[in-house]
Image (cartoon, rainbow, N blue to C red):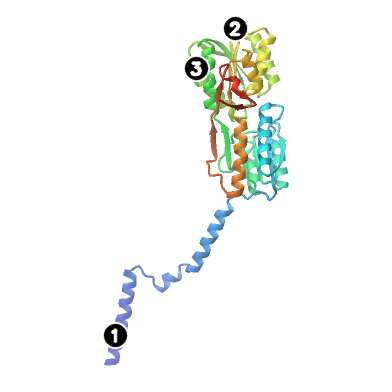
Amino acid sequence: MKKMNKFFALGLTVAMTMTLLTACGGKTTEEAATEPAAEEQTVETAETEETAEAEVLPGGGSNIIYVITPSHSNPFFKTEADTAEAKAKELGYEVKVSSHDDDATKQMELFESAIADKAAAIICDNAGADATVEAVKKAAEAGIPTFLIDREINEEGIAISQIVANNDQGARAIAEKWVEAMGEEGKYAELLGKESDTNAQVRSNAFHAVIDEYEGLECVATQTANWDQTQGYEKTETILQSNPEITGIICGNDTMAVGAAEACAAAGRTDIKIIGVDGSDEAAALIKEGKMVGTALQQCALIAEMAVEQADAYLKNGTTGLEEKQLVDCIAITAENVENLKTFVYTE
């Protein structure tokens, strides 16, 4: 009888212990067996942290920074390339400068060359908002970070930085100066940039956001001149023949505006009010001569320097400390402040 009482007491003790474990959130043997051991959880956590660290692109392994832009025959892009090259060399990098000539296929070849060279980073003013996505992804897969300047691409999360001029703000600012010069009335024409370039449509929309508020202003001709001076001249020549009544021309960039001004001068039309966007020395000279109303300065030298500095910070620290998309405001340049502009740099 005493032995049975001992067994009964032992069973009661076990039952009470199980009840207490359950009430306090304890686990049964079967439940505990289904969960990973503390050691296994620690390993999994470490692996997760390693994966997070691997997401930082380390660069290809060399000390080379590639600078890829459109044609250097355009002073805007030459300034970008020269400024980026100088800053990168100042920071101790070897630099390779190339032009894709707004050809997406050539741009991909240049990215592949950068990958083969195990480039540390790529600075690029790209050849198309959609066409460039694949090239940037390919560089990222090779561990090479890309820093985009001047033009955005239509995808986020694959380039480390996209640093562009605030085209909307700049085009609106110079459009207001143009409306004032036009006396808020008259017929005008527009020269558009390359259709594949996001900036072309952004600037046009911004121009019209201001101009269309004035009933006395009417756009009678629109032509695409692809950012090109020769096309700007030829398209303006044709427009003047078809629409001799125009008294103004708005241009998506300074290169087209310079071509337009040359065509107007050749036709003896000194009355036509012309604006552009960029802030080139050529436009500045025409503003001083009274052959252009103004331009919106995109601070491309500043933007190029920012990109190289951010590439250097990223390679050294694994982060730029900044958002991917960054806007740099433009400055409206007219006869009143044109003396402060030289080689895309504005000084007070």
Instruction: Name the secondary structure under disc 1.
Output: helix
Measuring from the top left, give residue 230's x and y in whole percent: 71, 19
Image location (x, y in percent) of residue 127 = 66, 33
Q: Amino acid at mark 3?
A: Asp
Taking the image as shown, residue 8 lies to the left or right of residue 297, namely left
Can you see residue 237? no
| Image quarter of residue 89 | top right
Q: Residue at x 59, y 23 (%)?
A: 340
Query: Which mark, by number, is residue 212?
Result: 3
Of label 2 and label 3, which has the lower sequence position?
3
Q: Which mark is residue 245?
A: 2
Which residue: 66% across, 9% down? 241
Tell me which residue sits at (64%, 10%) in the image: 240
Q: Eyeballing the image, is 50 above or below 114? A: below
Instruction: For residue 114, say whether it is visible.
Output: yes
Question: With respect to residue 70, does 323 lie above or below?
Answer: below
The residue tagged 1 is 8
Query: Which is closer to the viewer, label 3 or label 1?
Result: 3
From mark 2 to mark 1, how far is it between C-alphas?
Answer: 112 Å
Res. 50 image quadrant? bottom right
Amino acid type, mark 1: Phe
Element type at marker 3? Answer: loop
Task: Inspect the image, locate mark 2, and give the three-letter code of the amino acid beneath it.
Answer: Glu
Q: Nearer the viewer, residue 235 or 261?
A: 261
